[in-house]
Amino acid sequence: MNIKLSTKNVHIGKLRHQLRQLGKSLQREHVMPVITIDGPAASGKGVIAGMLAQEMRWNLLDSGVFYRAVAYVAQERGVERGQVDLIELARNPPFFLCRPAPWLPPSVFFEGRDITRFVRTEEIADIASKIATIGEVRGALMLRMLAEKNTPGLIADGRDMGTVVFPDATIKIFTVSQLEVRAKRRFEQAMEDKGEGSLLGIMQTIQMRDRRDEMRAIAPLKPAKNAIIIDSSQMTVVETFCHVVSGLIGRNEAPLHSVTK
Ligand code: C5P
């Protein structure tokens, strides 16, 4: 999370101030307010969730990291050969998450190693999305996610944060973006990390993963019925952030008038 918003930009500076005010107002009105951000792969939800949490100094829940960490351990232990009890693994995970501050993304440790970098790959995400179709696995991981709800508030991102895990969330966001744009973002990231990647390959993998996430019987990827939908296809990260903050402020001021059918 290296994105810094320049306070030299007056507009952003004002928005940051408004966001902090919003946080305080939500804290006064709710015991433990929750803002959920759901959306398909690479739609920008993780970055935006991180920026909100950091600005507001709220707890950050990256729910995908739980599925990814289970997937990583499962792969290490031979899930392809049917040697892993996935439900037991989700109930008693042998990894742990560690973060320097509650609003920062976690590092993942397994058997004394920092596996964060490996957990973030598209290969692990693909295994994660297969594992995420198992109801008992979701149930076990959901218990851990619920425990992340703490004062002063929670920013939770994933696929079912607003629909299943925190259905009573204070404000819900759903981010979307064109497939080509999302694939390009991941391609550029892969080039930066590894110096290689295939745009077409990434596009196909993301599309398959989204389809699996949308089609599964339990907690499928879909917007909560009262979510604010943000399409970031034509926006930079900072522009998306501005739209999300404006949406949050608007929803807090007029909660009943902006419900998406
Ligand atoms: O968000 P991220 O890309 O890290 O998630 C990896 C996979 O984990 C998703 O494709 C999805 O299958 C699963 N997941 C989920 N529910 C969540 C978060 C992630 O099913 N709340």
Image (cartoon, rainbow, N blue to C red):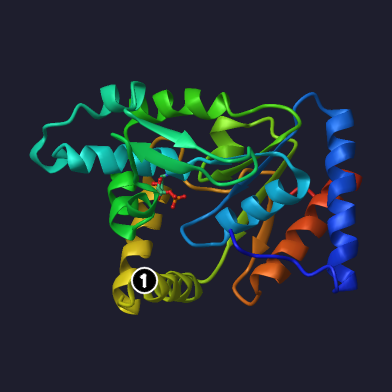
Percent x, y of residue 198: 30, 77
- Residue at the location (78% across, 70% down)? 6
> Residue 187 sits in which quadrant?
bottom left
Percent x, y of residue 122: 33, 59
Q: Amino acid at mark 1?
A: Met
Q: Residue furthest left?
A: 81
The image shows residue 121, relative to residue 134, as above or below, that is: below
Residue identifier under label 1: 203
Q: Residue furthest front?
A: 112
Percent x, y of residue 210: 40, 56
Percent x, y of residue 194: 33, 71
Name the side, left or right, on which 226 lies relative to 96: right
Say which of 247 and 197 sits in front.
Answer: 197
Say which of 168 and 225 sits in front.
Answer: 168
- Residue at the location (35% across, 78% down)? 199
- Residue at the location (74% across, 58% down)? 244
